[in-house]
């Protein structure tokens, strides 16, 4: 075997050497990195699934769309307004009865488990006699 | 008298001239006549002269030498090429014969001539046989059993020193595949070239036994005895297909796998070999590119591809994992962002819940800015101390301010960092 290898041309030897070097410096680290990331990903996904399970959410979070968001949120609160902003941001205004504040807190708890968005900055509350309005800015993940 | 004499008529073309000769064969050898020379523009006259000799001497053989550069010695007969058997297990092949209407009954390869010249000297040791014909070096490595390797090297425009370098390079190339150097060298030259012999002796540091014979004499010798030429002349038809055309297409890639493997080790000779398949297009092409070397022949191609397999496998594997890594990393980034956002939202919700709980029946919130960094609250309070206690319990560093209103109510504001 060694004799056969010795008899191969210098180009062939260089190709074999290049293959070995690439395997060691590129393929092996890529493989290790890949399997490490997969393990980390599965762990994080399990954690998110556990939280979703707590709120009885079975589906994975989906990208934010105005129509779907409005349709679903309007079932919970009196009035929902969504205004698109720049940079994948959306200004959201939710009007609700004062007694629905607990429902609103659950909505915040489950928002990112349902849509791939995060709340940027403050929750701005304004209340009148019996109604409360909350404004927030959502950013697509 | 002429009717009884066996005559060998020999001819070959060198540069733009045809050279013609004939010899009367006798029991004691042949008696050659004067060499006649015809310019290529006198081809018809040249052919007419051959026919005239054939008529004059009915018992004749018209003999010529193939100076084609695509001749290769192989272990098996190639069904797609014209060939001649020169050893028990060796065949010299070339793509086709194109004689251009010139009469020929026996057509020899220089390899066959070399073998015939030196076969009685071959023994168990390795002999390098070199034939110099028409400025081409026909090189054979052989012992009495078989021919181990053959190459055709061009010498056109080269100095004697460069020619010697090429011979030496072919010896090194052969050493790479067999770990053997030739034990001795035999050389048959058709031209008088004492300087070349001198340089070869100096460069190769070996004793070379030169034999100088004209091509005509060599061919007269080849044609003298039927036992000598019965198998060693190139048959003007394809060995298996018997097709009427002599032109041959592609080389059968499966012929002589061992020879193909040997080709790998001889890449270094590809640029100077004339009988490598790649050189059939342009025999003088010396500056072959790196990849041209891999494409030089079917045999080379298959073996070169084998050489590429580990690299291709590694590139494929690396590419797959890099791509997969990029994909899983994208998914991981999204999941991390989702986890981070979920934590922030949960904290925001918790803060909001705490604040609304702290209002209780003591106050009513009119406006609030709640984030995970700070809170700002404003409302109406009617139980100041319970509200203050509830808020300072949550945010001890907060600033609680009350302000009496005109309608006998009290407004509060509260600011705190979280």
Image: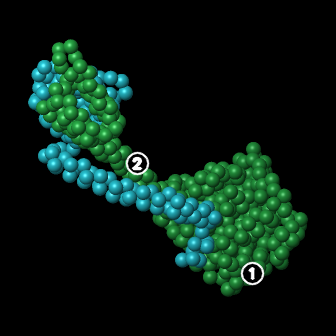
Chain colours: A cyan, B green
Rendered view: B60 above or below B292 = below
Q: Does the rendering let one see residue B242?
A: no
Instruction: Please tell me which residue lies in front, B162 or B102.
Output: B162
In percent of width and height, residue B316 lies at: 44, 55
Identify which residue is drawn at 11% across, 26% down: A97
Classify the position of the C terminus of chain B by image quarter: top left
Rendered view: B5 above or below A91 = below
Label 2 crowd bin: few (<14), some (14–19), many (20+), radius 10 Å: few
For mark 2, give the secondary structure.
helix
Classify the position of the N terminus of chain B by image quarter: bottom right
Q: Which mark is residue B197?
A: none
Label 1 crowd bin: few (<14), some (14–19), many (20+), radius 10 Å: few
Image position of B254 (left or right of A40): right
Q: How many marks?
A: 2
Identify which residue is drawn at 35% across, 36% down: B417
Identify which residue is drawn at 28% across, 44% down: B343
Q: Does the rendering let one see residue B247?
A: yes
Image position of B285 (left or right of B91): right
Q: Chain of mark 2?
A: B
Please tell me whether mark 1 or mark 2 is closer to you in this view: 2
In percent of width and height, residue B204 lies at: 81, 72
Image position of B338 (left or right of B77): left
| Direction top: furthest residue | B406
Check disc 2 and report the residue beneath it.
B326
């Amino acid at each position: 075997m060694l004799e056969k290898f010795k008899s191969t041309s210098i180009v062939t030897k260089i190709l074999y050497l290049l293959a070995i070097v690439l395997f060691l410096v590129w393929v092996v680290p890529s493989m290790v990195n890949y399997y490490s990331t997969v393990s980390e990903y599965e762990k994080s996904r399990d954690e998110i699934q556990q939280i979703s399970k707590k709120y009885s959410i079975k589906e994975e979070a989906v990208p934010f769309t105005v129509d779907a968001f409005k349709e679903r949120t309007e079932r919970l609160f009196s009035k929902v307004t969504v205004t698109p902003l720049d940079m994948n941001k959306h200004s959201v205004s939710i009007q609700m009865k004062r007694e629905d504040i607990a429902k609103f807190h659950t909505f915040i708890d489950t928002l990112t488990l349902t849509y791939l968005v995060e709340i940027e900055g403050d929750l701005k509350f304004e209340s009148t006699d019996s109604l409360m309005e909350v404004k927030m800015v959502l950013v697509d993940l | 008298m002429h009717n009884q004499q066996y005559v060998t008529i020999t001819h070959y073309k060198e540069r733009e001239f045809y050279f013609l000769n004939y010899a009367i064969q006798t029991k004691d050898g042949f008696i050659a006549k004067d060499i006649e020379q015809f310019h290529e523009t006198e081809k018809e006259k040249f052919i007419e002269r051959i026919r005239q000799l054939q008529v004059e001497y009915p018992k004749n053989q018209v003999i010529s030498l193939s100076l084609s550069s695509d001749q290769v010695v192989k272990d098996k007969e190639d069904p797609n090429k014209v060939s001649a058997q020169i050893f028990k297990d060796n065949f010299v092949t070339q793509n086709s014969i194109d004689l251009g209407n010139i009469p020929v009954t026996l057509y020899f390869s220089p390899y066959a001539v070399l073998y015939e010249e030196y076969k009685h000297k071959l023994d168990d040791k390795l002999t390098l046989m070199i034939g110099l014909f028409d400025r081409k070096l026909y090189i054979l490595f052989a012992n009495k059993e078989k021919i181990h390797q053959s190459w055709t090297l061009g010498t056109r425009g080269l100095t004697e020193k460069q020619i010697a370098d090429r011979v030496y390079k072919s010896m090194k190339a052969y050493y790479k595949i067999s770990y053997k150097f030739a034990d001795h060298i035999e050389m048959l030259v058709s031209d008088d070239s004492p300087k070349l012999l001198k340089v070869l002796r100096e460069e190769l540091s070996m004793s070379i036994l030169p034999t100088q014979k004209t091509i005509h004499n060599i061919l007269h010798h080849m044609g003298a005895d039927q036992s000598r030429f019965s198998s060693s002349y190139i048959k003007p038809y394809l060995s298996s297909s018997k097709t009427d055309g002599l032109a041959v297409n592609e080389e059968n890639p499966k012929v002589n796998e061992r020879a193909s493997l040997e080709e790998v080790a001889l890449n270094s000779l590809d640029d100077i070999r004339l009988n490598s398949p790649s050189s059939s297009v342009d025999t003088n092409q010396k500056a072959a590119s790196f990849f041209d070397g891999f494409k030089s022949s079917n045999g080379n191609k298959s073996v070169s591809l084998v050489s590429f397999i580990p690299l291709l496998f590694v590139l494929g594997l690396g590419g797959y994992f890099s791509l997969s890594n990029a994909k899983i990393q994208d998914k991981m980034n999204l999941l991390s962002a989702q986890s981070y956002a979920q934590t922030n939202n949960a904290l925001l919700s918790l803060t909001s819940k705490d604040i609304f709980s702290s209002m209780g029946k003591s106050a009513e919130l009119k406006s609030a800015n709640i984030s995970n960094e700070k809170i700002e609250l404003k409302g109406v309070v009617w139980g100041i101390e319970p509200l203050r206690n509830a808020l300072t319990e949550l945010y001890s560093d907060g600033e609680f301010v009350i302000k009496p209103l005109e309608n006998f109510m009290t407004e509060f504001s509260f600011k705190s960092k979280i």
